[in-house]
Structures are given as structure tokens and as C-alpha cells.
């Protein structure tokens, strides 16, 4: 089955700096990679996703890159703000399909004012 | 949008009682919903996949007789924790799949079993 590794587990940056979170996956047939943001006590919210037919996707200050050969994908947040502070989870589908998602262990991002 | 609601948001119950949690997709139909459990400061652990009109598929190690799932309509799935015990206390979150891949999460239900 799919195995998703996420690094780092914690990340602290100064407001305005960039933050990068990386994930690796094991199933080469996986084709969909979402990123979720979870604030304390709240639901995970989908912030961006990427499919295997593209290498990069941007949405304002957030971008995701995908390297299928190396089987890793990364979340990039530029010009970080205190409200970006949260736990971020990456995920990948199991068994190459898109039925179930396997989540990384999460990265706690703290943006210091 | 893609809105998923969950009810109740909080429940406290005595050991041995059963608790039902509802998950609803409000503005789209979801043939597939998922139930997760999340412990403090940990990731999301998939418990089961709920398919409308058929039996749920449980992950390894999840007792299907303890966590009963019913997906009776395209907008509603329920999770019943039967004979709850303190070790069942947790944050339970559902998600509904919209389209082929994207999952949208409910706000979660915090269960405390005394």
C-alpha cells in the first residue's frame, strides 16, 4: 500500500519568509496529491492539490510542486503571515487509485510576527 | 462550494452507551464518505469507507461491530459507536468525496466517554 512521509514535523519561520514542506510517497501509480491545512480544533481544509499530469500549481501565495520520478511533492508558502500558522498535511491515494487517501504525519507551522 | 456538516460537534456520554454521529454533504451528492479518527497532535487515521447503498469497508484493526456505519442516502452517512468506553474518546471526522478524488471534511465530533 501507499506510504507517505512528511518533513519537517515542525517548522518555525518569521513573518514574510517562505516555508517549504516536503512529502514523499511510495506508490508510483499515485496520481493525485492534496494538501490540507488544519487549525487547532478545526476541520482539515483543502488548500491546494495537484494531479500527476502537471509539475507545478500555484494559487496566490501557495504553490505545490510534483516530481513523479523522485516520488515527492512539496508545498511552498511565500510571504508567510501569522494566520498561516497551523498543521499542514499532505496525502496521496492508496493503491494507485483515488479512492482512499493516506496522510502524512503533519507539519506544525508557526509564523512568528 | 463543497460543504460538509457533522453533528453533534461535542458529545459526552457514560461508558456502555452508544453514540451516533451524522455526516452530511450539504451542497453536493457523495456516493463515498470516509470516517477518520484523530488523536491529539496526530494525523488522520482512516477508519472506514462508507459507500451509499452498500456495506462499509473497514480498515484493518477497526472493529466493524463496534463502529457501525450506515450510508443510507447520497448526502448522509452515520457512524455509531456502540457500547462506548473511555478508550473510544477521540476526535472523529468525516469527509465526503466530491467528484473522482477530492475529499472535503466535516468539522469533527469530539467524543468523551466517562
Image (spheres, coloured by chain):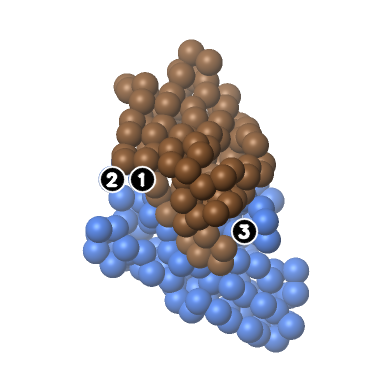
Q: What's the colour of chain A in the image?
A: brown
Identity of the residue drawn at 46% across and 51% down: A81
Q: Which chain is blue?
A: B
Chain under callout 2: B
Which element is circle 1 on? strand
Mark 2 or 1: in front is 1
Chain under callout 1: B
Identity of the residue drawn at 57% across and 27% down: A24
Q: Is residue A33 above or below residue B21?
A: above
Crowding near the residue tagged with mark 2, few <14, some 14–19, many ≥20 C-alpha atoms within 10 Å: few
Does the CB distance between marks 2 and 1 fall below 8 Å? Answer: yes
Residue at numbered disc 3: B38
Residue B48 visible in the current orientation? no
Counting residues from the start of the chain, the first of labels 3 and 2 encountered is 3
Residue at numbered disc 1: B102
Location of residue A33 by image quarter: top left
Q: Would residue B74 appear left or right of A26 to someone viewing this image?
A: left
Quadrant of the rendering where the N terminus of chain B is positioned: bottom left
Q: Position of residue A104 (x, y in %)?
A: 59, 40
The residues tagged by marks 3 and 2 sit, at their Cα atoms, a distance apart of: 25 Å
The residues tagged by marks 2 and 1 sit, at their Cα atoms, a distance apart of: 6 Å
Q: Would residue A39 appear left or right of B86 to someone viewing this image?
A: left
Q: Position of residue A53 (x, y in %)?
A: 32, 22
Q: Is residue A95 above or below residue A60?
A: above
In front: A33, or B37? A33
Residue at numbered disc 2: B99
Q: Is residue A69 above or below residue A15?
A: above
Identity of the residue drawn at 66% across and 53% down: B42
Q: Which residue occupies the extreme top position in the image?
A: A69
Q: Is residue B111 above or below residue B45?
A: below
Which element is circle 2 on? loop
Q: Position of residue B17 (x, y in %)?
A: 65, 83
Amino acid at each position: 500500500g501507499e506510504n507517505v512521509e512528511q518533513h519537517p514535523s515542525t517548522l518555525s519561520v518569521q513573518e514574510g519568509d517562505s516555508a517549504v514542506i516536503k512529502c514523499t510517497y511510495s506508490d508510483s501509480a499515485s496520481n493525485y496529491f492534496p494538501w490540507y491545512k488544519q487549525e487547532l480544533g478545526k476541520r482539515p481544509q483543502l488548500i491546494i492539490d495537484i494531479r500527476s499530469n502537471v509539475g507545478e500549481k500555484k494559487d496566490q501565495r501557495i504553490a505545490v510542486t510534483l516530481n513523479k520520478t523522485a516520488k515527492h511533492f512539496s508545498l511552498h508558502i511565500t510571504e508567510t503571515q501569522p494566520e498561516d500558522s497551523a498543521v499542514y498535511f499532505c496525502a496521496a491515494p492508496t493503491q494507485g487509485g483515488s479512492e482512499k487517501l493516506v496522510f502524512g504525519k503533519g507539519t506544525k507551522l508557526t509564523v512568528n510576527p | 462550494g463543497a460543504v460538509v456538516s457533522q453533528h453533534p460537534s461535542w458529545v459526552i456520554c457514560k461508558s456502555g452507551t452508544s453514540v451516533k454521529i451524522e455526516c452530511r454533504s450539504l451542497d453536493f451528492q457523495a456516493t463515498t464518505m470516509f470516517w477518520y479518527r484523530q488523536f491529539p497532535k496526530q494525523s488522520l487515521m482512516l477508519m472506514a469507507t462508507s459507500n451509499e447503498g452498500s456495506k462499509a469497508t473497514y480498515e484493518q484493526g477497526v472493529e466493524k461491530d463496534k463502529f457501525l456505519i450506515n450510508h443510507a442516502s447520497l448526502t448522509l452517512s452515520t457512524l455509531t459507536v456502540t457500547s462506548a468506553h473511555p478508550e473510544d474518546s477521540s476526535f472523529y471526522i468525516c469527509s465526503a468525496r466530491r467528484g473522482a478524488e477530492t475529499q472535503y471534511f466535516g468539522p469533527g465530533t469530539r467524543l468523551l466517554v466517562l
